């Protein structure tokens, strides 16, 4: 008798849970696409690229100097005393260490480029997140997935894509004129307005 009651309760909970899951509303956005449409993001990326290019040129120059010092040392090594050799080797090692430190300070984890990217891009990402939340609330959506994130979406039907609405919420006009549906299986582009979830 206890087994029958447990089985009945388990089936009841399963039925209730499956009804709740099937009633949930979901959509997805492509945050990479949304950010690429923001003029401020394009400007931030251009600034980051310029800074990165300048720093890389400085790093290349420092390593070129190390290489030049090493080649000169190799050419003159035979005529140097042991003390002079040791002194020159230490100078080369110190110069190389300084170049690596500079490279790490600029491009390493939590380096200046990392901090500058956070300074310029994080406020834009926060704005996009707020717009996504507004879209979710106004459409009664339970889940919004990010197509450009770590989650793998093998097939994504564009009728569930809310990226355009997020851009509208941000006051941005898309320069792409609509995203393509290249990741959809054949025949799934033929969606009528009745197929669309509420917006």
Image: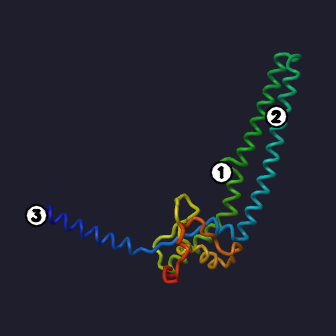
Q: Residue furthest front?
A: 186
Label at residue 3:
none
Label at residue 110:
1
| Residue on which the image places disc 3 | 1
- Percent of width and height locating residue 83: 82, 18
Q: Residues within 10 Å of mark 1 (few under 14, many from 20)?
A: few
- With respect to residue 132, does 121 lie above or below? above
- Could you give the CA–CA distance between mark 1 and mark 3, rounded to whole angstroms? 63 Å
Mark sitting earlier along the chain (1/3):
3
Q: Quadrant of residue 124?
A: bottom right
From the viewer's perspective, tell me whether residue 188 is left or right of residue 90: left
| Residue on which the image places disc 2 | 66
Q: Name the element at disc 3.
A: loop
**Residue drawn at point x = 24 percent, y = 67 percent:** 11
- Report the front residue among 81 and 1: 1
**Residue drawn at point x = 47 percent, y = 79 percent:** 140
Mark sitting earlier along the chain (2/1):
2
Q: Please tell me whether mark 1 or mark 3 is closer to you in this view.
A: 3
> The N terminus is located in which quarter?
bottom left
Q: Quadrant of residue 170?
A: bottom right
**Residue drawn at point x = 65 percent, y = 74 percent:** 178
């Amino acid at each position: 008798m206890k087994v029958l009651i447990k089985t009945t309760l388990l089936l009841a909970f399963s039925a209730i849970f499956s009804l709740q899951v099937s009633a949930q509303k979901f959509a997805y956005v492509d945050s990479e696409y949304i950010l690429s449409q923001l003029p401020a993001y394009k400007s931030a990326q251009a600034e980051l690229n310029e800074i990165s290019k300048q720093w890389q040129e400085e790093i290349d120059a420092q390593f070129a100097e190390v290489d030049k010092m090493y080649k000169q040392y190799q050419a003159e090594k035979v005529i140097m005393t042991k003390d002079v050799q040791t002194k020159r080797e230490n100078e080369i090692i110190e110069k190389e260490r300084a170049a690596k430190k500079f490279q790490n300070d600029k491009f390493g984890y939590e380096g200046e480029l990392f901090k500058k990217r956070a300074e310029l891009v994080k406020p834009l990402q926060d704005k996009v997140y707020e717009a996504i939340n507004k879209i979710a609330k106004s459409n009664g959506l339970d889940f919004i997935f990010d197509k450009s994130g770590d989650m793998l979406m093998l097939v994504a039907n564009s009728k569930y894509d809310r990226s355009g609405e997020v851009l509208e919420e941000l006051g941005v006009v898309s320069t792409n004129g609509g995203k393509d549906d290249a990741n959809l299986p054949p025949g799934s582009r033929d969606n009528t307005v009745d197929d669309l979830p509420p917006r």
